[in-house]
Amino acid sequence: MTKNELADGVAQRTGLAGTQAREALEVAIDLISDELAGGGEVALAGFGKFSVSDRAARQGRNPSTGETINIAASKAAKFSAASALKKRLN
């Protein structure tokens, strides 16, 4: 499912116009992104939790040449599914 398909589904279920649903979805994504960028987390009851994970610096290999390279430390977005979502999937 794409973002447009998700917005269309929101529009159909809520009765909002398609443009309003897309706008609301964009705002929700921006709010989640802003919270994660600030180091926070977003918990959606029954769905899951978005958080930030720190990745340590490490050594890797260039797959083309086999040369050892240094991979810098970084942050990554992480999602943990709620138990209600896990049950719905199984």
Image (spheres, grey):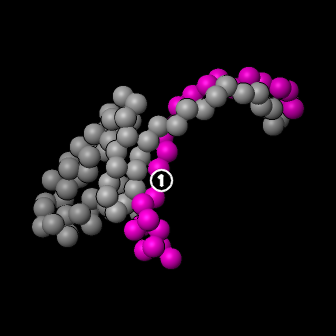
Residue 79 belongs to magenta span: yes
Kind of residue at disc 1? Ser
Any part of residue 79 in sight: yes
Residue under label 1: 80
Q: 8 above or below 37?
A: below
Above or below residue 46? Residue 41 is above
**What x and y, as percent, mark residue 45?**
31, 58
Q: Position of residue 81 (x, y in %)?
A: 45, 58
Quarter of the view holding residue 55: top right
Q: Check the image and name the residue furthest to the right.
A: 66
On the image, which quarter does residue 66 sit in?
top right
Q: Is residue 49 left or right of residue 71?
A: left
Percent of width and height locating residue 64: 82, 35
Rendered position, 83 above or below 70: below
Q: Position of residue 61 (x, y in %)?
A: 80, 32
Comparing 85 with 83, the one in front is 83
Viewer-proximal residue among 49 and 19 = 49
Q: Which residues are magenta?
A: 65-90
Q: How many marks?
A: 1
Q: Secondary structure at mark 1?
A: strand
Residue 34 colored in magenta in the image:
no
Q: Residue at x 36, y 28 (%)?
A: 38
The residue sitting at 20% across, 50% down in the picture is 24
